[in-house]
Structure formats: C-alpha cells, structure tokens
Image (cartoon, grey):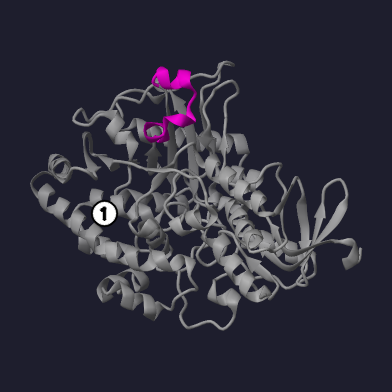
Amino acid sequence: MTASDSRQYDVVIVGGGHNALVAAAYLARAGRRVAVIERAEAVGGAAVSERPWFGVDARLSRYSYLVSLLPQKIIDDLGLRIRLERRRYSSYTPDPRDPSRGILIDTRDAAATTASFVRTLGDDGAAEAERFSAFGARLAPLAEAVFPTMTDPLPTADELRERVGDDDLWEALTTRPLGDLLRRSFESDLVRGIALTDGLIGTFATSDDPSLAQNRCFLYHVVGGGTGDWDVPVGGMGTVTKELERVALESGAEIFTGVEAISISPDGDVHTMTDRSEVFHGELVLSGVGRAVLDRLLAAGGSETTGAETPEGAQVKVNMLLSRLPRLRDESVTPEAAFSGTFHVNETMTQVDAAYAAASGGLIPDPLPVEIYCHSLTDPSILGDHLVADGAQTLTMFGLQVPHRLIADMDPVAAGAKLLAAAQASLESVIAEPLRDCILRAPDGRLCIEARTTRDLEESLNMVGGDIFHGALSWPWLDAPASTPAARWGVSTPHPRVLLCGSSAQRGGAVSGIGGQNAAMAALEILGD
C-alpha cells in the first residue's frame, strides 16, 4: 500500500485512553486533522465506568477511581463539564494491634483529629498530631511549586528547587529514600505508614528502596492540584471519558474504535487490522499506549525501539457493592466517616515493608496492606435510585505489594480468588463482622464482589505487567534544558515523528490528561503554522 492509498492526517494517535482524547481535543481545536485509533470497542482505557454485575444498577469506576492530577487548566481549556467533589475526611487508620481505636483525620476539625491521635497513640498523640500537621504544611510549598509546571515545558531541577525554597526537603525527597524523611518526621510506626502508602500505590518498593521509586510515586500523590487533595469525579470515572470524547469529536477529531494498530513506522505510517488491513498516515504519530506496547509496534515495523524496560504492576483492586457499610471495632468512629476517606488497613511502615519482603520471596503478603474507598458516600449518583434508598454503598479495596510476578503464571481465576481472599481477610481483621454479611447479591445469586488483578489489566487493557503507570514514574523535571520541543515537553522517543502522549510520558501516570496536553503542545510546535 502506498502513501496515497492511506488515510492522511496531521496527527495519528494510537490508543484511545483519556490522555489520547485530551491530545486529540487540543490538536483538533487548533485546526489539525486528527485520528484516534483504539483497539477496544469504546474509548477511555482505564478511565471508564462499568456495571460489573448483570441486573445491578451500579456504575463503578472499575479500574481508576479518584482524580488529583487533572489540572483545572485542561478542564478550562477544553470546556469540560466535569464536577469533582472533595471528601471531608482524609483518612481513617485503625491500629492493627488494637482495632478498637484508630486515627481519623478530619479536614474540617483539627481538634477532633488531635483527639483521635491521642485516643489511638496515648500520651504522645497530641505531639504526633502536631508533627503530622507540620509535615503537611511543609509539603504545601512543594505542591504549590511543582504542580503549576505540569502543563508547561519541563523546568530544570535547579529551577524547581529554587521555587520550593526548602533545600532540606528537596534533598530528602530527591536524593534519599523516603523512609529516612518519615522516620525523622514521625515517631509512630502507624503514622509513618499513613504517609508512606502515598509512595506505594502501584509501586513495588520499600520505604528504604535505593531506587527512590517510592519517592517519585509519593511526589505525584502529594502535589496534585497544588494541594495534594484527591477528589471524586461525580458520576464516576466514565463521566470524565465521556466529556473528553465529546470535546474531541465536537472539535473535529475522528475516533476509530475496534481498530488495532499492528505496527508503527518512524515516517508516520500506522498499519492497522480490523476485517481488513489499512494504513493511517500522520505527519506525527502520538503513542497513547505504554512504552512496552509502543516498542512492540515499532519492532513490528522494523524500527528502533525506545528501549523500555518490561513494566510490572504491584496491586490488586477489589470492587464490591454492599447492602450497608460494615460495623467497626472502633465504636468512637462511624462507618460513614471511616469509609468516606482513605481507610488504611495493615499499613504501618513495618507492615508495608514486611509485605514487600514476603512478596519478594514469592508469597502473597499476610496481612495484605489494603486501602479502601467508598465513592458512593461522596457521590451517590453512581447508584440507581432504589439502591440509594435501600442504603447500598460501593466499596473499593486497593491491595499493595502484590507484584505481577506473583500471579503471572497462575490460572487467572485462581489468582483473582487468592488475592481477593487476602484482601478480604485483611479488612476483616479490623471490622466487627464478616464482610460477606454486607455484600449484596445480584439477581442471578452472585455476590457483588470482584478482584481486578494485574493479569486482568494486561489482558483487558493491554497494560503490560498490569502496570497502571505504564512503567516507572520519572521526576517531573530535567537535569538540563532540552533543545527539541518533544524533549522540552517530556514526550520524546528516538523517532522525531513519534511522540508519547500517555502515561509513559515524563509526567504521565494517573488520570491527569497531562501527558496528552503536553504531547499536543509539542506537536503544535513541531508542525508549526
């Protein structure tokens, strides 16, 4: 097939995740002819809402769940009709040694927060509450300095360090393992764990990992929105995708679903396959798939790859629908308060590091560190009216320190069952009744609970190794100024006409749109007038 036989575009985007839709919207609004190619029958990737149980009117954000890194700038630029709700309670953390007490962090009542520290930690509780508050205040200038740069060309490390204005904090986060900073900041193993888990979502590491993978993950979790707050998208994650799709289409982008890319060439040819082979040609190609997938496509076209390492996810996500929230062993806290923020289970620093050691030895951690969220407390619109009237609630459990290697060779059903059992056992260690007593049943009799493993992510979303970040996170800055638009925006590959636009971009990861916006800005610079 010759170039004249192919579909001709200014930009061809491979993959239809949320970042790809952001890039398509920006480029189409700038007057560029854009095609988005998605192998699934619908766009959105991991940022979708689904009804997992037949006959049950519950629309769950099945893979991704909260929004922190989506800049208001992108929402405003694209005119997205998205509503985000802030959660009153930041977190609840029962003491695994005595689950009848726990720390509830109330963002609207500092005195109540201090009282929960005292109730849980005893005589040093008030001082630890002050240390926790001081730690948050110390991170605030970091978030305020870093987040606004996410939609600009990459700053240098020296430029950002000067903006932050706290050299000790900068050194602690960028040169030494996070565990050192947390041990210097807190006295309690429980409180150290509350902070540490922000560095381990989807990341397999310890507090003292010399790679600093946990530090980079921590940074992205605490800078979102310039405040570090994580919000609930009203209507579920699918509303975010629907809005991005709407804006992209109304701006003039063409979206092709059910079309799979089979190779990419450096000159802009994307070979695809449906019921027949077809070529999409672009002056530029943007890759919304992970680097590992992009490398497969480049290799299939006989081209140099990006040299990406094989990624590995390290989490399990359990979705469920409950008839009611489970009772707690801690009678001083209501289930509605405890579950409306992030509910930490068996996540002291010691426990999280021990879980890493167990998984490194080939074992599913026992207990499994787990984080839990109840979206429907903040946004009941994801449930049908009759479920809301009956008091039903969603619950999401996110298990840490379960690298893909633990289940890569297992039967998928058996792997899901094992990880589900581990997550359920962990939660039941801190609640006052069996979880099963609270789980709703679908009309066909099935319990409304499912586990989505790294294997599921790999098979359903083409995320190699089930890595939700598409590879290791990188620092959101450069060591030295870059000379090309693609490098300045953190979206470069070895091929000048192939750019990254997804979570593999330098500031990718999470539901942010940042990778898509940055790729679009680089593309517009390259294409010129």
Q: Quadrant of the C terminus?
A: bottom right
- Can residue 292 be seen in the rendering of this structure? yes
The amino acid type, in three-letter code, at marker 1 is Arg
Q: Nearer the viewer, residue 157 or 363?
A: 157
Q: Residue at x 65, y 68 (%)?
A: 499
Give the residue at mark 1.
192
Side of 30 where 33 appears, left or right: right
- Predominant secondary structure in magenta? helix
Up/down of 344 relative to 475, above or below = above
Secondary structure at badge 1 equals helix
Q: Residue at x 47, y 77 (%)?
A: 478
Snapshot quadrant of residue 84: top left
- Give the magenta range: 374-391
Q: Quadrant of the N terminus?
A: bottom right
The x, y position of residue 519, in whole percent, is 59, 66
* Residue 86 painted magenta: no
The x, y position of residue 321, in whole percent, is 46, 27
Pointer 1: residues within 10 angstroms few (<14), some, or many (20+)?
Answer: many
The x, y position of residue 404, in whole percent, is 55, 50
